[in-house]
Amino acid sequence: MKFESILEEIDGFGPFQIFIIVALCVPRLVLPCHFLLNNFIAAEPPHHCDLSTLDDGGLFSNLTQEQKLVIGIPSREDGRPEPCEMFAEPQFQLLSNVSNGTHMPTVQCQSGWVYDNTTFTSTLATEWDLVCSRKGISKATSSIFFAGVMVGAVSFGALCDKFGRKYTLLASYIVSVVFSYSSAFAKSYLLFAAWRFLTGFGLAGVSLICLVLGIEWVDVEHRAFIGVIGGMAWAVGNMLLAAFAYLVNDWRMLIMTVSAPLGLAVLTWWWIPESARWLLVNGKAERAEFYLDKCAQINKRPILSSKLKMEALSNTEIMENSNKSYSYLDLIKTPKMRQLTLLSGFVWYGVASTYYGISLNIGGFGLNIYLNHFIYAAIELPAKLLVYFCVNTIGRRKCQAGTLLLTGTCIAVNIFIPKDVWLARTIVATLGKGLSEASFTTLFLYTTELFPTVVRQNAMGYTSCTSRLGVTMAPLVLMLDEVWKFLPDVIICSVAIAAGLVSLCLPETLNVRLPETIEDIEHPRRNDISSFSIENTDVIVGLQSTTDIDQ
């Protein structure tokens, strides 16, 4: 495991790496815009039944709109009209306030609905009347999208390890662009749902590959920085979504607006390098040499001579059989890999179900939907900054366990705070959300460091799949409040604490070189960075004869 030694010679964090970070941040801005897009495009504006069926051309047509609502639609306790019911016949006596209309016969809306377009010009609900008995269809849009993300995570994880990071990333860009814009022009809900599924499929590849490709090009000291920068891009994109949605009130135009940065990402793809780590472990040393030369040139470091470099590369993380194809089965074939896979899968499930469980269960601040979304997104920024300092001081494992255990503690504390003490509940709930976001950011970085290069994307695909399972389960858990109002909180709290305890069983990766092969996991070697540093080119030449160092 001497790739970092070569990387140190050509600078593991110079202008070359900074360009990669910036280029990969562009598509990461799009991810939250699509992952949370349903909050706006599937919003259900205030509505009531269309009363045109009650207009008989007589007295009804001469009434004002307010009077028509009084005699045509029952009122709720707060005075607003019922959204899904109307009187079977006009109740003119209600104009004299002699009756409240409580016991008068009602029917379901007969001629569709009239929507309040004050906040939204158009949404999925107004486009296809996905309200009342069809309300669940609109809510299912998010589940369909994340089903695509789940399938895409598994598929792109395998493709990326087989065909490389660079070209698989291009494929994910193209799939995301084509189907996101296709969904904006869908003429039916079924077609829209299909295109959203495929959009999620493509964006899953963007999410996984951007993080892994960035981390594989930097040195040990800056891996945490790369992970946190990716998380910061998510938070910024999340805040931008609130701004885009505020400025663009039509759901079709909003989809096209938030997808536009993917076009810039496609243009920058031409300058993004393939992962030299992946090239080396797949026996493509000459191609790896090309990118390493480019890295040294841009970072203004001396380029090692071809002979010297090839001797070094021939001893660097080359697989025993470079033609071997790795699959998801390799995650469970050997004992330590199997243990690592099971433990990390459970932690991912716990982190995802906790984060979305809290996000869906926290009450708003009484503000409009745009400002509310912006505040929740802004809360994530200090959480990610906290992660950057914690993972480099107390380590990845303690940071992962600590954020999860503290998240569970916040949920438990809120169970015992009376609901009328709303300020204290809001503060504790917001703190819990920030900590759950910190655990998510830590886990993305932690997972890329735990698994070897040959199956790293497969591992990311597997863990992403388990996390989407957690996302799917979170709304179902929240529905259990009908059984006992505190049951969802108890379950989410228990899952968070259990995941935190399980994460303590994972190995620490602070200042540890990235594993390249499964053998590095099953038979780990000394991995202190100081013991692998290359002092001069003579050491590189000597690597070929000192194979005992690798043992």
Image (spheres, rainbow, N blue to C red):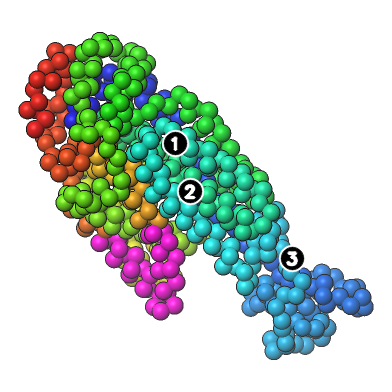
**Residue at image mark 2:** 201
The residue lying at 54 percent from left, 62 percent from top is 140
Question: Disc 1, disc 2: CB below 8 Å?
Answer: no
The residue lying at 77 percent from left, 71 percent from top is 111
Vertical placement of residue 255 versus 96, above or below: above
Q: Earlier in the sequence, mark 3 or mark 2?
A: 3
Give residue 532's quadrant in the image. Answer: top left
Q: Earlier in the sequence, mark 1 or mark 3?
A: 3
Magenta span: chief secondary structure: helix
Q: Earlier in the sequence, mark 1 or mark 2?
A: 1
Vertical placement of residue 294 versus 467, above or below: above
**Residue at image mark 3:** 114
**Residue at image mark 1:** 169
Give residue 349's quadrant in the image. Answer: bottom left
Q: Quadrant of the N terminus?
A: top left
Q: Position of residue 197 (x, y in %)?
A: 52, 53
Q: Disc 3 to disc 2, how far (Cα)?
A: 35 Å
The kind of residue on which mark 1 rests is Leu
Q: Position of residue 538 (x, y in %)?
A: 14, 13
Magenta-colored span:
469-498
Left or right: where 548 falls relative to 447: left
Vertical placement of residue 136 versus 191, above or below: below
Q: Nearer the viewer, mark 3 or mark 2?
A: 2
Numbered label tally: 3
Q: Position of residue 270 (x, y in %)?
A: 48, 25
The kind of residue on which mark 3 rests is Val
Left or right: where 74 falls relative to 180: right
